[in-house]
Image (spheres, helix red, strand yellow):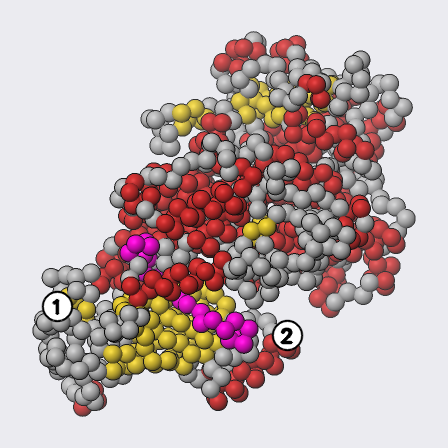
Amino acid sequence: MALAKEIMGCSMMDFKSSSSSPFFNQNKFLIRPSLVNPSRMRRDSPVHLRKAKKGAVAAISEDLVKFVPVFSAAEKPVKFKVRAVVTVRNKIKEDFKEAFAKQLDALTDKIGRNVALELVSTEIDPKTRKAKKSSEGVLKDWSKKSNLKAERVNYTAEFEVDSNFGVPGAITVTNKHQTEFFLETITIEGFACGPLHFPCNSWMQPKKDHPEKRIVFCNKPYLPNQTPEGLKKLRQKELKILRGDGNGVRKLSDRIYDYALYNDLGNPDKGIDLTRPTLGGQKIPYPRRCRTGRLPTDTDMLSESRVEKPKPMYVPRDEQFEESKMDTFSFGRLKGVLHNLLPSLMSSFKSDKDFRGFADIDSLYSEGVLLKLGVQEELLKKFPLPKMVSKFQDYNQGILKYDIPHILSSEFRRHDLTLLYISSADENEKDKFSWLRDDEFARQVVAGVNPLSIERLESFPPVSKLDPEVYGPVESALKEEHILPHLYGMTVQQAIDENKLYIVDYHDVYLPFLDRINALDGRKSYATRTIFYLTPNGSLMPVAIELSLPQAGPSSRAKRVLTPPVDATTTWLWRLAKTHVCSNDAGVHQLVHHWLRTHATLEPFILAAHRQLSAMHPIYKLLDPHMRYTLEINALARQSLVNADGVIESCFTPGRYAMEISAAAYKGWRFDTQSLPADLICRGMAVPDPTQPHGVKLVMEDYPYGSDGLLIWGAIENFVRTYVQHYYADSISIRSDRELQDWYSESINVGHADLRNETWWPSLSTPDDLVSILSTLIWLASAQHAALNFAQYPYGGYVPNRPPLMRRLIPEETDPEYANFLADPQKYFLSALPSVLQATKYMAVVDTLSTHSPDEEYLGERQQPSTWSGDADVVEPFYKFSAEIRDIEKEIDRRNSDPSLKHRCGAGVLPYELLAPSSEPGITCRGVPNSVSI
């Protein structure tokens, strides 16, 4: 703790009275400032201290004070100067308008249109009953420093305060310039205790647009009932500003957090094909999103009008991407230029192309998609591109040349399904053909993009929970004879009892939608079930796949079971079945586990945190890094990913019904099963075991997501418990914290209003309740999201491994297409995959989504790590948490080198690094950011 205090300088916690220190008594400084010119004093002049009868607070100026004589308590308070060091972060790039406005501000700053600050004391004036305030201080040398190209620029300001001013607890900022600026931190120098830190990290808007003074609080955390008298009104005022009044169209410069339904996904003004139902409400329950207040559409008063790219969607100003993050995201969009030009492309060329062979897919990584389409010259003539795009094209010899995904070799080489020979020259390369093997298909279920769907099979055969009156018999077509030959001599019940059988079951997710999905042009899907067996050598293997279609009539055959192949024909049928399973999995991964469980369901908790928890609240300080950028990325998703005719609808099998599948899953979502231990137990992948560090024991030892995840979960929970126990001694302190209770209540009753009456919501009555709730939220925002997001391109960038949609069903012997399938099974297989345009559009998007930006903050990191809190008793535990995270990374590296762990180590096997906390920028298939930031 001593180290943490030394790093932080003045910790506000040190203002407590202490008999051991002559400088403090009843929260007052006992140092008498002097008017003696310090240049006339010897450096070794003694400093005389004495105990004061009255605790007057002295403000010490570095420029004025070197000698401190005693003074009488009866003397009149004297005004003295203190200094602020204000750190402003410059914009890296400015357009002409911004550059002109910046120069204008530099000129007008000299005549009083400047940036003014005012210190606000934690104490109130006994006469006025208002908070004590300093004189106004102005940022110096703004005009001189306006042309500095440094990323950060420090400015200073001076204030006059009375010797009985007390301790500054807040600073008000008035921006009289024409343009906004980003205020990073303010440090106040000159008080007896040392520097006072005021983290801000916020955009200061011009007074002409936002007349209210901005309030920046000191880093000292206060529970509501501990708020100093001088800060109480400011605390309430700031929260009132952030809540807004629920009316009006939001401006991009606003800082207002409010709720709305998902009524902006469709665009009915452009036609009935782009109409989409509102998500949220009794009819279709769904979480709430950030309100923008945009006007309704012309044709549907209940639908909000859309803002299309490149115009920005509203999120509160401080939630928008910072420049380096936006640059990374924009470059991703550049790589996805085909996506932006798709409507024009589709109208310019008569038909989309199929891949003619696997060499066509390989060429995407060597030639580029426009060359592959054979339309590069024609396209560039029709659609002149910016210079940056042209340079990108010249450099790559094709605008969209993709990086080779991790699932393939690190060095490109053409191959075909019929060519499975690897020469000795490739010994050090990854196995390029692993995606074809059954063990790799199974391995990705526990260590791939979506490790959240696998469940332990507890009874056989599986049974549907759907209404049999609507969807037909609940019984599965799977029989014991389908799987017995693959159980190494065990009976089915023995395999179940010994935790050897597992299932990925998408039957009930897809079946209610299949009639509508399969009626869409170029979309074909099954509702799949896959049974896996854990072999004696520790690797998982698929033993049966059930493919279900809606029952057309009493005698129709709606269910079909395929098992591992025995000849050439069944080999191709088995490949098609596995590919349909992967397509089902891609949809559930994206719409349910990824978007719903980590993006959409977290947004209400974030909105409520900004609306109900003061920036001074210790729980807000804990959650702050785990809320970064989430509202922005969710808004961008509504604009171009989950909207009507967006990427998800265009590239995934469910098409226009994608978000309805997500909403259907929300009906079964439960917050109390979102922690990692609860989720593992719920899926049967772990059993309760109080002897284990995390209270659970995995039933499959080599489950990389589960085993690595429990390490991360344990570190998060331990840190959160230490943090919570520091501020809350008992249940009374939890229940009496009005801000905390309002945050949790609003998250449920407003943000998740459609599920507010469910009995499974955890109560918030004890410190243990709070530890569980906060640990779950931090887990979801960090490790859970990372495990689901950053492998999308490394695995899905090679479309045959993980196709997001399928265009053909598997032919049966009675089908007219069966003869074509027998004649050329590879051609049939490729025709079932996404087309060239669909595939490349998808690849461009998951490339962007899988990319870490240079400004990423990873688990165990924080902005201003030593000063984010003025409480050394929580800063030091945070350093211990960071050290534990680094140790976990070493343990993950060790596990990835353990040959007994078949799901993460072996010839050509990708190591499981998705929960390894750190990462370099780019596509790395590793790294755990603090928040849902992409």
In the depicted view, which residue is nearer to us: 775 or 480? Answer: 775
The answer to which image quadrant residue 324 occupies is bottom right
> Which mark is on residue 95?
2
Give percent across and percent down for residue 729.
26, 44
Q: In this view, does 19 lie above or below 159?
A: above
Q: Name the residue under label 1.
A: 22
Magenta stretch: includes residue 49: no
Residue beneath the point at 57% across and 11% down:
492
Label 1, residues with CA under 10 Å away: few <14, some 14-19, many ≥20 = some
Q: In this view, does 243 lie above or below 560?
A: below
Residue beneath the point at 55% across and 73% down:
209
Quadrant of the frame with the N terminus: bottom left
Q: Which of marks 1 and 2 is in front?
A: 1
Judge whether residue 7 can be spotted in this image.
Answer: no
Residue beneath the point at 52% across and 86% down:
108
Drawn side of residue 461 relative to residue 680, left or right: right
The answer to which image quadrant residue 822 occupies is top right
Which residue range is magenta in the image?
Answer: 206-226
The residue type indicated by label 1 comes to: Pro
Give percent across and percent down for residue 876.
30, 53
In the depicted view, which residue is nearer to us: 123 or 28? Answer: 123
Magenta stretch: includes residue 222: yes
The first of marks 1 and 2 along the sequence is 1
